[in-house]
Amino acid sequence: MANPADGTWLLIEADAISDNGWVAGIGTFTPSGGAPYTRGWVAQLNLLPGDYNGNGIVDAADYTVWHDHLGQNFSLQNRDPNASGEINGTDYDFWVSHFGDTGSGAGSTAGQASSGTQAGVPEPSTMSLMVVAMTGCIVRMAARPALRRRVAKGGLPR
């Protein structure tokens, strides 16, 4: 089997994605100094440490997941890879050490295969703000000729 560190993987089609970051699919592998070839593969994505609910932010919601499973044998996603057994205070300390980290939105690395790249993509709220601003500019530009005609006729009505 090829070592992923000795080349480049490119995902072509993802057939399955699990809750804990495993992806199965078809892709090409280009070994260092070799020719690319296509094959089926399974890989685990780089996930955000301490993001126990998988929403891309290490926040209070992750504390809730930790607290709800404290003392239980539970598969806590994005758990410290050195931790095992019951959910405990070590998992809390791990969460605290990553609190505030984010992994979603433009420029992040969470949910990204280790050899992949990302480009910045505007968030939906940014696009909405841009549409509102452009609409205001268009309305203002369209109103200028009418304003000039009113001023030319003797000023604005009171």
Image (spheres, rainbow, N blue to C red):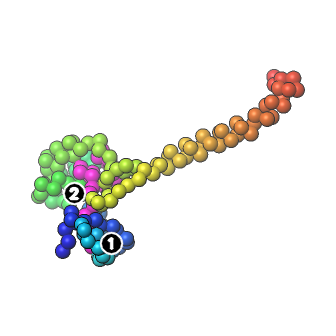
Is tag 2's residue or tag 1's residue first in the polypeptide sequence? 1
Q: Please identify, in this view, whether the residue under mark 2 or under mark 1 is nearer the observer.
A: 1
Return the x and y of residue 106 as percentages of the image width and height: 40, 49
Magenta segment: does it hold 57? yes
Residue at 18% across / 46% down in the picture? 94
Query: Circle 2 sits in a helix, a strand or a loop, which is it?
Result: loop
Q: Amino acid at mark 1?
A: Gly
Q: Position of residue 48 (x, y in %)?
A: 27, 52
Secondary structure mostly seen in the magenta stretch: loop
User: Which span is picked out in magenta?
Assistant: 41-61
User: What label sits on residue 123 in the rendered view?
Assistant: none
Is 81 within the magenta?
A: no
- Quarter of the picture containing the C terminus is top right
Left or right of 106? Residue 88 is left
Q: Is residue 65 visible?
A: no
Outermost right residue = 153
Q: Measured along the vertical axis of the image, is residue 157 above or below residue 125? A: above
x%, y% of residue 104? 36, 51
Residue position marked by numbered label 2 in the rendering: 76
Q: Quadrant of residue 79?
A: bottom left
Q: CA distance from mark 2 to mark 1?
A: 29 Å
The quadrant holding residue 16 is bottom left
Q: Identify which residue, 4 or 70, lies in the foreground.
A: 4
- Is residue 153 among the parts visible in the rendering? yes
Residues packed near mark 2 inside 10 Å, few (<14), some (14 to 19) or many (20 plus): many
Residue ID at (79%, 31%)? 147
The residue that appears at 80% across and 30% down in the rendered structure is 148
Read off the residue under disc 1: 27
